[in-house]
Amino acid sequence: MRRALIPLTLFSLAFGYEEATVVLYLRRIAFPPGPAHVFALESGREASTIIVLAVLAWLCGRQGIGRWRAFLVAFGLWDVFYYAWLYVLSGSPTFTSTDVLFLLPVPWVAPVWSAITFALILVAAGFFGLHRRRVAFFGAGLLFGFISFVARGIGIAHGYPVLLFIVAAALAVFAINVADVARNVPPEQPGRILGEIPR
């Protein structure tokens, strides 16, 4: 993963800026026609973004697992840089603002800090990999994180469910394989090369 980290970071930095400018343009141009028009534009833009990030991950990874890890790094870095560029270019949203994070398949409404925190967890999971025996914890963390993000959008919560987010983040972090890093295992040893999940 170290080999791919620099191109993934540079791409995500540039793509985050591009996304931020596109969002600002869409907000200025599309809001007068009404919410339905904005929803269609934003949904198409979001789907295109995921496709671009998936193609980048495909090109950076050697096999299925390596491509998944590259996608996690690219998606996480893109999300962080997206919010950084939005703030630099417009002064909004702030770290504590509530934002519509995503529209697909339903609106994701949550504080910006939660999106950035989870994005950084995805970067760590992609970079360090997942512990083989804890992959299910990561899946549960993703599921609970998703539920925390969409809870307000689908009307099952009035405010952001912070406790659910904490559980989601803890499960995801628990699954990350940091044992080899703590023991200073060189990246070329088995289980640490791009595309393999350590035992």
Image: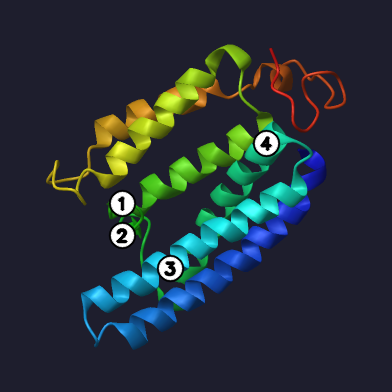
Residue 49, position as x, y percentages in the image: 53, 62
Q: CA–CA distance between discs 3 and 2?
A: 15 Å
Which residue appears at 46% of the width and 27% of the height?
139
Are discs 1 and 4 less than 8 Å apart at CB? no
Which residue appears at 79% of the width and 39% of the height?
62
Q: CA–CA distance between discs 2 and 4?
A: 27 Å
Residue 44: which disc? 3
Q: Find disc 4 in the rendering and name its residue.
A: 127
Seen in the picture, residue 159 relative to 85 is either above or below; the reply is: above
Residue 100: which disc? 2
Q: Find disc 1 in the rendering and name its residue.
A: 111
Q: Who comes first in sequence, dot 4 or dot 3?
A: 3
Q: CA–CA distance between discs 1 and 4?
A: 25 Å
Disc 4 secondary structure class? helix
Q: Who comes first in sequence, dot 3 or dot 1?
A: 3
Residue 74, position as x, y percentages in the image: 62, 50
Residue type marked 1: Pro
Residue 37, position as x, y percentages in the image: 28, 78
Nearest-to-viewer mark from 3 and 1: 3
Residue type marked 2: Val
Q: Who comes first in sequence, dot 2 or dot 4?
A: 2
Are discs 2 and 4 less than 8 Å apart at CB? no
Disc 3 secondary structure class? helix
Nearest-to-viewer mark from 2 and 1: 2
Q: Dot 1: within a 10 Å radius of its alpha carbon, few (fewer than 14), some, or many (20 or more) residues?
A: many
